[in-house]
Image (cartoon, grey):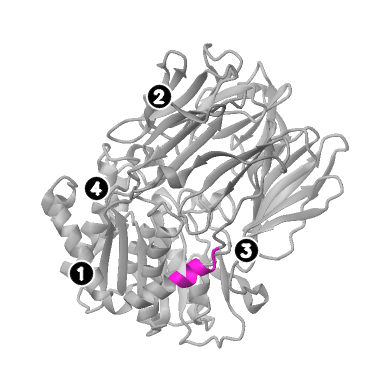
């Protein structure tokens, strides 16, 4: 029998629960009181590196240049455009600082301009539950229209008549995106276009790059299905592209007289197919790029004479360029051995310029324009790090360490040149390891506040992600989920054996499903870490996966398993952090959550901390910080969220007796 002594915390409307969370916050504040000035200085230090009056690289779409900028001292972006030329007068589409004034939380879910450029549809979430209201603005008069659309996922897709929009709504209890509606502006009316009955699927609606089709996607963890409609006939009926078949995933892109299809059908690492506009079932698909055992095909970008593929091989991302007119193939050369890259905003077909993003552990986020004919790169922007950052003062490394089953797991590290690597060197190991989401080596200016104080920062590219291909994900889910935890532990042990640190100076950090990772490795190897930061952690896996009324649960069965199945139940229970807390010593722990979190409900970390307090036998620090006005992503403002990072860093640095 499974007894849940802290189930009573599962009631955010109960004043006793709110009092309990506030008491925990007061405890955290009291324990961290000696670090308050340090937190403030860390905050100031990290904010000082941010270029406050920053702006994005403009891109051209349908007669206008679009960009986003920030004003000095302000939390939120200003969305702008200029007609035809960058020398034209600026037109402010939306100033989020005005929307967010006097609001604890303000997040834009999506912005969409009508094809005639006259109307803006945008969505806002003021509660941090990822439930968005759509508003409309007349861009000719700069006036807000009276119509609004409630309970959406944030996106709104215009048909070509400039009067009709398609959007997705959520089930009010589970928050599953389950219905696509068609909205007609002139008479403020809407109707259901498609309702997804299968509770393991979620819906999304979008428009093709060609602007010719409206596309409804219905996806579960393992299976895809698409419906398409000519964007010129918005009142028509959607046609199924290919009926769902369990285990077959695919994505589609329209170009001229063909659909291109990225699919795992008979291709674990995906392959590229194409078909005519009228015959779209898979028996009509023709192979364009075959399956490759050593290469995961992650995405594609189509141009009139070029096709660009996002590929992943040996743990690194690559950009492959195929030219239609010459049948030539080449790869974009990257300046470093370890990096992250990916296609950027490329809204027009008629171009030989590819915009892509680039970063590494030492190189700030950069935007390049790449001439696919001359093969020359032009740096359009590199994230400016104020305060004199010099990438040459830092070194990055990549190692493959051997996990207990012989699998070679990549680990990326960055630290300041000149530090002496010994068993007393502090090291922070970060990972995620779920949903096939890869954590690639990327730059963070915030991270410098640890590295400049002598820390090594490491990312473990563990199974459950897709860093090494699709098999990497499949070997870290369902009844193989423990590989994720073992990989992380084995990476930590290997770094110690290699002389980078020791258990007295080793720290672990992860969020959401990465917070599950933190809870699991704490139970399995509690003495390997001096401190653990678990951000919005998914730690009560059994209870959540048994409750289909909780947001996300039904769509997660193919990731974790359905505990109504005995084998899945026993396996999940064997690693679920909340269920495996024991009477033993644990490391110092900081746990963060948000009262309005729609992804991982606040009661999971709250219950976990309560059980840890009850059973742990050590005198180490155990803190729970609940943001009472935020959800899964934390604060919405660009400076407010830095306060959360400052708390986490102060917690870790204080354990190293670093006070300034």
Q: Residue at x 43, y 63 (%)?
A: 642
Q: Residue at x 31, y 68 (%)?
A: 590
| Disc 3 + disc 4, Cβ < 8 Å | no
Q: Which of the marked residues, 2 or 4, is nearer the chain's N terminus?
A: 2
Q: CA distance from mark 1 to mark 4?
A: 27 Å
Region of the chain picked out in magenta, as a range: 44-50
| Depicted 537 relative to depicted 352: above or below | below
Asked if residue 643 lies left or right of residue 604, the reply is: right
Q: CA distance from mark 3 to mark 1?
A: 38 Å
| Depicted 39 relative to depicted 573: above or below | below
Q: Which of the marked residues, 3 or 1, is nearer the chain's N terminus?
A: 1
Q: Is residue 3 visible?
A: no
| Disc 3 + disc 2, Cβ < 8 Å | no
Q: Which of the marked residues, 1 or 4, is nearer the chain's N terminus?
A: 1
Q: Which residue is mark 4?
A: 543
Q: Nearer the viewer, mark 3 or mark 1?
A: 3
Task: Give the structural element (helix, strand or loop) at label 1.
Answer: helix
- Nearer-the-camera pick, 249 or 440: 440
Q: Which residue is mark 1?
A: 27
Q: Which residue is mark 2?
A: 146
């Amino acid at each position: 029998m499974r007894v849940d002594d802290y189930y009573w915390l599962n009631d955010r409307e109960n004043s006793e629960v709110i009092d309990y969370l506030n008491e925990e916050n007061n405890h955290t504040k009291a324990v961290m009181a000696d670090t308050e000035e340090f937190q403030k200085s860390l905050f100031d230090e990290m904010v000082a590196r941010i270029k406050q009056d920053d702006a994005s690289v403009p891109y051209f779409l349908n007669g206008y240049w679009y960009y986003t900028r920030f004003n000095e001292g302000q939390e939120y972006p200003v969305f702008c455009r200029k007609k035809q030329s960058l020398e034209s007068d600026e037109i402010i589409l939306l100033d989020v600082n005005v929307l967010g004034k006097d609001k604890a939380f303000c997040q834009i879910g999506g912005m969409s301009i009508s094809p005639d450029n006259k109307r803006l549809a945008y969505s806002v979430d003021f509660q941090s539950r990822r439930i968005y209201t759509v508003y409309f603005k007349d861009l000719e008069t700069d006036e807000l229209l009276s119509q609004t659309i409630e309970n959406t996922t944030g996106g709104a897709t215009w048909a070509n008549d400039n009067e009709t929009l398609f959007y997705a709504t959520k089930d009010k209890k589970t928050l599953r995106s389950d219905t696509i509606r068609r909205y007609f502006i002139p008479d403020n009316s809407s109707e259901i276009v498609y309702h997804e009955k299968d509770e393991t699927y979620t819906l999304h609606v979008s428009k093709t790059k060609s602007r010719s089709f409206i596309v409804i996607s219905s996806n579960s963890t393992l299976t895809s299905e698409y419906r398409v409609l000519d964007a010129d006939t918005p009142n028509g009926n959607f046609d199924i592209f290919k009926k769902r078949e369990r285990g077959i995933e695919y994505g589609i892109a329209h170009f001229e007289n063909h659909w291109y299809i990225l699919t795992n059908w008979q291709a674990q690492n995906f392959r590229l197919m194409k078909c005519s506009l009228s015959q779209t079932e898979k028996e009509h698909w023709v192979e364009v790029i075959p399956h490759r055992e050593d290469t995961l095909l992650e995405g594609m970008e189509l141009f009139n004479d070029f096709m660009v593929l996002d590929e992943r091989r040996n743990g690194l991302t690559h950009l492959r360029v195929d030219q239609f007119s010459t049948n030539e193939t080449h790869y974009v050369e990257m300046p470093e051995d370890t990096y992250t890259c990916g296609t950027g905003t490329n809204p027009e077909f008629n171009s030989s310029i590819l915009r892509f993003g680039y970063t590494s552990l030492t190189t700030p986020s950069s935007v390049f324009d790449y001439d696919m004919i001359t093969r020359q790169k032009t740096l359009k922007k590199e994230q400016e790090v104020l305060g004199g950052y010099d990438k040459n003062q830092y070194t990055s490394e990549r190692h493959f360490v051997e996990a207990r089953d012989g699998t070679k797991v990549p680990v990326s590290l960055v630290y300041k040149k000149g530090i002496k690597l010994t068993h007393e060197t502090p090291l922070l190991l970060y990972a995620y390891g779920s949903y096939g989401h890869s954590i690639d080596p990327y730059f963070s200016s915030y991270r410098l506040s640890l590295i400049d104080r002598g820390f090594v920062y490491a990312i473990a590219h563990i199974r459950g992600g897709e860093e090494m291909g699709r098999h990497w994900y499949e070997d870290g889910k369902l009844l193989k989920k423990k590989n994720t935890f073992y990989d992380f532990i084995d990476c930590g042990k290997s770094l110690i054996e290699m002389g980078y640190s020791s258990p007295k100076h080793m720290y672990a950090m992860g969020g959401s499903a990465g917070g599950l990772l933190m809870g699991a490795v704490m139970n399995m190897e509690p003495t390997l870490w001096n401190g653990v930061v678990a951000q919005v952690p998914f730690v009560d896996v059994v209870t959540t996966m048994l409750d289909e009324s909780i947001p996300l649960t039904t769509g997660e069965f193919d990731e974790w398993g359905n505990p109504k199945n005995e084998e899945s139940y026993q396996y999940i229970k064997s690693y679920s952090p909340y269920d495996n807390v024991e009477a033993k010593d644990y490391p110092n722990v900081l746990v963060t959550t948000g009262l309005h979190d729609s992804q991982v409900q606040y009661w999971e970390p709250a219950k976990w901390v309560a059980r840890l307090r009850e059973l742990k036998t050590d005198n180490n620090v155990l803190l729970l910080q609940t943001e009472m006005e935020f959800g899964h992503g934390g604060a919405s403002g660009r400076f407010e969220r830095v306060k959360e990072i400052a708390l986490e860093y102060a917690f870790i640095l204080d354990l190293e007796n670093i006070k300034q």
